[in-house]
């Protein structure tokens, strides 16, 4: 959230009361909150309000924590994870140039010819609101 954008507490409170975020302890809670995450993601990153973006971050963290506790992580190459996140968020390669420096480097990362550095992994984690470990 930038300094120029203000959170509307009433709107955020209404979104939170609808989503009812909790520490996930069951598959049913997981599925319910995962569905809330996908509903927000399906709007597209550019179409989310500040309040929706904050809720997405909270719900994503809860879902991620549950998945880390209960589900083994498949051995998926970081470039494939990055491609998937880009598809879900409808991002083009040009959106990653600020992280990787050049469009050529983005192409090399996505094709698997170049590895993602720890600094880049942290920047990607922040952009996609996921763990940096996905990219290392």
Image (cartoon, rainbow, N blue to C red):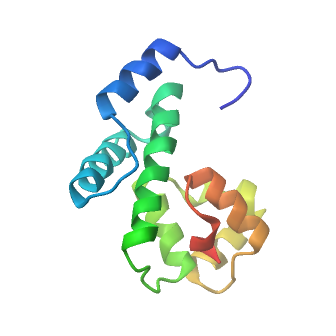
Please give the name of the residue rendered at 51% of the width and 43% of the height, measured from the top-left corner.
57
Badge count:
0
Looking at the picture, how far across and down is residue 86, in whole percent?
49, 59
Q: Where is 113 relative to 94, above or below?
A: below
- Is there any visible trace of residue 48 in the rendered image? yes
Question: Can the viewer see residue 87 in this picture?
Answer: no
Relative height, residue 119 to residue 57 (above, below): below
> In the depicted view, which residue is nearer to us: 17 or 121?
17
In-image side of 35 versus 90 (left or right):
left
Q: Residue at x 59, y 63 (%)?
A: 131
Q: Position of residue 11 (x, y in %)?
A: 44, 17
Residue 44 is left or right of residue 35, and the answer is right
Q: Nearer the viewer, residue 34 or 29?
A: 29
Residue at 65% from the left image edge and 87% from the top image edge: 113
Quarter of the picture containing the C terminus is bottom right
Residue name at image x 25 percent, y 54 percent: 31
Give the x, y percent position of residue 48. 46, 32
* Relative depth, front residue between 68 and 132: 68
User: Quick one: quadrant of the N terminus?
Assistant: top right
- Residue 3: horizontal and vertical position, in percent? 74, 24
> Does 19 sit left or right of 107 as displayed?
left
């Amino acid at each position: 959230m930038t300094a120029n954008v203000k959170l509307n507490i009433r709107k955020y409170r209404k979104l939170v009361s609808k989503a009812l975020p909790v520490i996930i302890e069951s598959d049913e809670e997981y599925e319910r909150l995962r569905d809330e995450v996908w509903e927000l993601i399906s709007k597209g990153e550019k179409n989310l309000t500040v309040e929706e973006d904050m809720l997405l971050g909270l719900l994503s963290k809860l879902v991620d924590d549950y998945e880390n506790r209960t589900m083994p992580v498949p051995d998926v190459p970081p470039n494939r994870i990055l491609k998937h996140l880009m598809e879900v968020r409808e991002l083009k390669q040009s959106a990653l140039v600020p992280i990787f420096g050049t469009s050529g480097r983005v192409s090399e990362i996505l094709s698997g010819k170049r590895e993602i550095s720890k600094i880049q992994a942290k920047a990607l984690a922040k952009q996609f609101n996921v763990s940096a470990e996905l990219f290392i």
